Image (cartoon, rainbow, N blue to C red):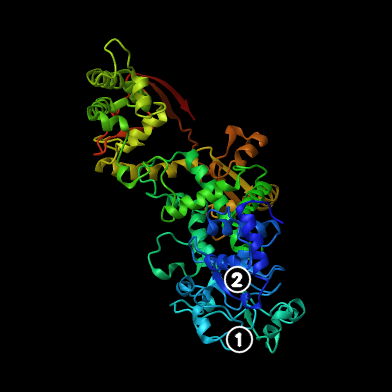
Amino acid sequence: MPGDSDGSKMAAALEKVRKLNSSYQDQCMTCENWIKLIKKHHQWPDDVKNPTCSLGHGVRTYYKQRGVAAHAWYPNHFGFYTTNNGSSRKAYCSMPPNQLPSTPPSNINWKKLYSFDIDRTPLTRRRTRKYDDVFGVDKEIKNEDWKKPFRSPIPTRKSPRNHSSSPSLLFSTLVSPPQGSIASSSGTNSNCNDISEDAAAPTNYATWVYWTSSEAAREFGLIKPSRGEDNEEITDVVLGRIEKVKAAWQEPRGWRKVIEDVDSQDLYTVTDVFKLRLTCQYLIKALEIAIRDMNEVNMTWQKCCKAAIEEISKCDNWKYIKDSRTITLWHRQFRMNNECFKNKHLASTNEDKARVSHLFDFFPLAKDSLKAFIRANLHHLTTKQVCIELQDRILPQCAALRKDELVQGGVLHANEKYESQQLLEELKIPKLSIPTVYRWMRRLRYKYEVRKKCYYVDNHEKPENKRYRKKFIKRYLTLELRVYRWIQFSDAEYNGFCSENCKLEEQLKSKGFRYCNDDPKNCTLTTDRIEFHVDDHNKFWKKMLNDKVKFGRNMSVCARGEKPLICFGQDECIMKQYLFTNKAWATPEGTRSLTPKDEGMGLMISAFVS
C-alpha cells in the first residue's frame, strides 16, 4: 500500500470506498463528490490540508506505481479511469475489473457534471433518463445500450470535413470488443450481474484513441487557431506541422519558412541554419513516432522524443542532443510562436524587433557617429574596422558620458574609474565581438553584397566593334581549318577508341565530321572516316601525344593542299597594387562606393602561346 503522505491516504481510502456499493460503479463524478463518499464510509484523516489536490496527486501516484494508465481509458484490472476537461478539474469513474465505462469522455456534459452534488441527489443502481441528465450524458441512453462497455460507434460531428477521409481516422480502427469484457463481469463481481445480463454485443465498435482526448489537444493542438474547427482533428494539425517543418531540410531555402520573419535581415549564419535543420529533423521524427505510437498504453510524448533521439543516433552514429526534454521545449516554442520559431538574433517581443542594441537606445548619438564612420569609409569598409571604431572611440565616449551622469547622481566619485567594459556590463552586452557588430550593421539595414561596377563603359558594345566582331569570327573559323588542331579516325579506330572510354560516343554524338578519304569535300560518297577538333574531348590530346604526331595535331582534311597556319596568342596577368574584395557594404538607401577601373599601380606578366 502507499506510504503515509496525504495523497497516499486519500488514494487508499478511495480504493476501498468505490468497491463498497454497486451503485458507485459506472458513475463519473468529480473529486469533491468522491471525497464526500470517502467521508461517509471511511474514517477521514484529520491532517489532510487540501483534499482535492491530495486526492489527485495520490490517485496519479497510486496507479502509476502499479503500471496502470488510468487516463488512457483502456481496460485495466483495477477498473478505475480518470479524465479531465482541459483544466485542473478532474473526474473519476469506477468500474468492475477489465471493463470500460459506458459513457466515453467525448459524451460527458461537464457543465452538468460540475453542478451535480451527491448530497442532494443520492446514487442508485437504476439508470433513468433523469440520472442520465445528472451525470452529464448528452443524449438518452437505452437500457440495453448503457450496459455495453465503452466501444461505442464514432459520434457524428457537425463539421464541414469529410470524416471518412480524415487522416485521424486512420488511427481509429473498427474492432470487436475484447473477449470477456462483458461476460467476465458476472464472475468478477456478483453485485454487477445485472450489468452483463442481456448485453448484446454490437457489431462494430470504434477503438478509443489518444488523439480524440483533451490531453492531445493540449499537447499538440494549435494555440491560436484561425477557425474554431481547426483543432477538431489533432492528427490533421500534427501532419500539417510535419509537412511545414520538413521544408526546412528538403528545400534549399526552406529553413526560412519556419522562422518568424523568414530572416528578412539575413542574420542567420551557415552554422545557425545547420543547427536549425537538425532541430527540425529531431522534431519531425518525434512527431512521426507520436502519430504512430501514442495510442499505445503507457506511451507519452516524452517517450516519443526519447525514441526519436535513439533512432536518429543509430542512423547518424552521433547525438546532437541527449535529453528528450529538449525536443519537448522546441515543440512548445514552435506551437507558442504561431507555428514557427523565433528569430534568435532579434528581440524577444514584437515591440523590440526594431531595436539594434541597448547601447544605441541609451546613446542615440553613438548610432549617428557609427553611421557617419561607415559612410566615410564605405570604399574599403570591413566589419573588423567598425568593431575597432566602436572599441577605440565610440564606447569610451559613451562611458565618459555615463560616468558624468553617475557622478552627478552621487553613485560614483569623480576619481573612480568607469571604462568601456563596465558600460557593456551595465547594458548586459557580454562581449563586443565581430559577429555582434555584424548583426548590428545588418539591423541598421546595411547590406554586404556582391561588388558591382557602375558608371563604367569599355566601348566593347559600340556598333562598329559589333560589326567587325561578326566578320572576324567568320574569317577565323575559315582559317582554323589550316591550323594544326584536328584529329582523324577510321570507323574501326573510332569504335575501338569508344569501347575503351565509356560514354565517349554519347558525349561526341553531335560532334565530328564524317567524310570519305578519297574526296573529303564530296558529301555524296560513303563515309569511312571521322574528324574531330582536339578540344572536343580531353582524351584526344593524350592520344595525339602518345602517337607522337608532328606539331601535336593535324590539319583538317578540308584544307588539303593549302598552306598551313600557325596562330600566336598573347595573354597577361596583372598584379595590382590594390585588391578589392568580391563583396562590399552598401547603405540602406543602396549607396555604394564607386569601383574604379584601375586598382592602382600594377605589374604585368605577359606571355605568348601558339
Which residue position is annotated with label 1?
145
Task: Locate residue 8, reporting x and y percent.
Answer: 64, 55
Q: Position of residue 507 (x, y in %)?
A: 58, 51
Q: Nearer the viewer, residue 585 or 467?
A: 585
Q: In this orientation, does residue 243 appear? A: no
In the depicted view, which residue is nearer to us: 416 or 556? 416
**In this rendering, position of residue 484 left or right of residue 440:** right
- Residue plotted at (71% across, 80% down): 191
In the rendered image of this protein, does residue 226 appear above or below residue 460?
below
Residue 162's x, y, as percent? 49, 78
Q: In the image shown, does 179 or 196 lie closer to the viewer?
A: 196
Identity, as a three-letter code, of the amino acid under mark 2: Cys
Residue bearing the label numbered 2: 93
| SS type, badge 1 | loop
Residue 490 lies left or right of residue 485; in this view the side is right
Q: Vertically, is 317 above or below 609? A: below
